[in-house]
């Protein structure tokens, strides 16, 4: 069983869904510490005026050590984000097809108080549109102690995984030997080789929300969300 253990992000880019789509189970690692100016509460869309950030306002003052699943939303934000998305993508080939569903997500998200709840709503919805069969679960069901690799290993073992797929940025701290000693093979995701697709607003940009792929390519979104390079051991 292949597992990935990743902190939740707001409307993530296509590589995020490519990674979790290669796994049997995605453990949402939101007991990890919240980091300001990360992807937890923001992402980018492509507009007529260039790439634009959409950021969910959250309460951080005096809460320096809070975990992602403790982060509360500060003020109304969803309608503003939807209006920005609508303006940016209303001329996209498949906007009319997906707009009612995505708008419904924003209306539901507007009623939620915590960042993790919002992220999970979008993660499940987008994964469904992409046809991913991966099981999404909270790390809360797999209590684990320790830090960094030790903590991840505890979750992987509790889940019964024999393969662990990680993003490349984790190489800086990940102890691969600890996993191999436990009989769990580590694989590393590569984000190279994603094909370009018809995209609005000038020169092509990969590093934007996966909503860009969905609105521009519709039923073909999955093929544009998988690179030619495969994960490596």
Image: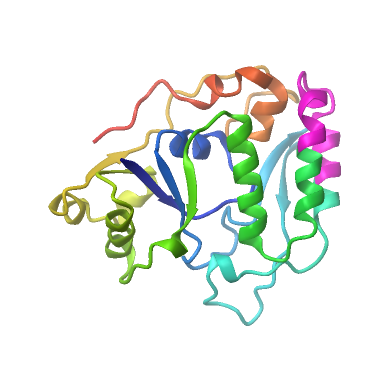
Task: From the top left corner, tell me how far across and down residue 97 is, in percent.
Answer: 79, 24
Vertical side of 182 occupied by 32: above or below = below
Q: Work out whether 169 lies above or below 56.
A: above
Report whether 132 appears left or right of 162: right
Viewer-proximal residue, 204 or 212? Answer: 212
Residue at the location (28% across, 39% down)? 187
- 173 vs 205, left or right, is left
Horizontal relation, residue 52 to residue 226: left or right: right
**Is 12 placed above or below 111 here?**
above
Q: Nearer the viewer, residue 85 or 37?
A: 85
Q: Residue furthest bottom?
A: 62
Residue at (65% x, 61% y) in the render = 115
Left or right, 62 with respect to 189, comes to: right
The percent coordinates of residue 144 (x first, y second) are: 34, 67
Quadrant into which the N terminus falls: top left
Q: Which residues are magenta?
A: 82-101
Q: Position of residue 207 (x, y in %)?
A: 58, 36
The picture quadrant where one finds residue 110 is bottom right
Q: Is residue 209 visible?
A: no
Residue at horizontal 80 percent and vertical 32 percent from the top? 99
- Residue 148, placed above or below residue 83: below
Q: Residue furthest left?
A: 181
Q: Quadrant of the C terminus?
A: top left
Please indicate, yes or no, whether residue 67 appears anywhere in the rendered image.
Answer: yes
- Spot occupied by residue 62 in the image (x, y as percentages of width and height): 63, 82
Q: Please, what is the dominant secondary structure of the magenta stretch?
A: helix
Question: What is the quadrant of residue 23 in the picture?
Answer: top left
């Amino acid at each position: 069983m292949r597992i990935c253990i990743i902190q939740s992000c707001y409307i993530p880019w296509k590589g995020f869904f490519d990674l979790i789509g290669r796994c049997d189970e995605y453990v949402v690692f939101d007991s990890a510490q919240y980091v300001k100016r990360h992807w937890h509460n923001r992402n980018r869309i492509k507009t007529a005026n260039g790439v634009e950030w959409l950021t969910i306002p959250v309460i951080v003052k005096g809460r320096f050590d809070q975990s992602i699943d403790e982060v509360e939303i500060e003020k109304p934000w969803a309608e503003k984000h939807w209006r920005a998305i609508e303006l940016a993508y209303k001329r996209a080939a498949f906007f009319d097809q997906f707009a009612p569903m995505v708008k419904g997500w924003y209306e539901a998200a507007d009623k939620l108080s915590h960042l993790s709840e919002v992220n999970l709503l979008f993660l499940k919805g987008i994964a469904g549109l992409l046809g991913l069969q991966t099981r999404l679960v909270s790390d809360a069901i797999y209590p684990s102690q320790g830090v960094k690799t030790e903590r991840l290993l505890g979750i992987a073992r509790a889940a019964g995984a024999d393969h662990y797929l990680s993003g490349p940025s984790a190489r800086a701290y990940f102890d691969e030997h600890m996993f191999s000693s436990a009989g769990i093979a580590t694989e590393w995701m590569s984000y190279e080789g994603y094909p370009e697709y018809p995209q609005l607003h000038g020169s092509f940009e990969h590093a934007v929300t996966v909503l860009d792929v969905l609105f521009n390519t519709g039923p073909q979104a999955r093929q544009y969300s998988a690179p030619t390079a495969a994960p490596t051991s």
